[in-house]
Image (tube, rainbow, N blue to C red):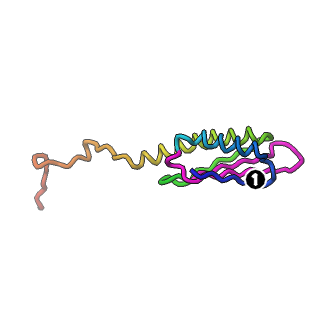
Amino acid sequence: MKLSMVDRSGVLSKETRRLAEERVRAALARFSGRARRVSLVVEDVNGPRGGHDKACRLAVKLSGAGEVRVSDRDPNVGRCIGRVADRLAHAVGRTLARAGGKRRKQAISPWDQPVGQEDEYIMSPS
């Protein structure tokens, strides 16, 4: 799994980058075979004005199941990354469960069974 981080506002320190990478990798560990690329984008939306202004976006490209994206805002960038990582893991699990359901064989109901010779009813033209 390849992880790329983009800091658009200079919010991530070296330590925060390391913790973010650990947090994202831990959250997606059980999907590491299916997750190809993961990208984290962090930015300070309001600048120095404060408020819920640290925006975090995580996107993961899954093999055979498309892409999953999650975003959130929080004043604390570490808490924002942690919450987004948890939400992404949950969303990836749901997406893969849905994709797995499409590949399963459908159960054949008794009404879909082929009709045997003894059950065949042929109408003669009138």
Which quadrant would residue 78 be assigned to in this image?
top right
Q: Residue at x 89, y 48 (%)?
A: 48
Question: For the residue marked with disc 1, what is the amino acid?
Answer: Asp
Label 1 belongs to which residue?
Answer: 7
Q: Position of residue 4 (x, y in %)?
A: 66, 53
Q: Is residue 82 magenta?
A: no
- Count how many numbered circles sit on residues in the image: 1
Q: Position of residue 20 (x, y in %)?
A: 69, 43
Horizontal side of residue 5 vs 75, given as left or right: left
Q: Main secondary structure of the magenta part?
A: strand
Q: Secondary structure at mark 1?
A: strand
Number of other residues with Cα within 10 Å of mark 1, as a class: few under 14, some 14 to 19, many 20 or more: some
Q: Is residue 51 magenta?
A: yes
Horizontal side of residue 85 vs 110, given as left or right: right
Indicate whether 126 appears above or below 65.
Answer: below
Which quadrant would residue 83 be assigned to in this image?
top right
Q: Position of residue 101 (x, y in %)?
A: 42, 45
Magenta-tinted stretch: 32-61
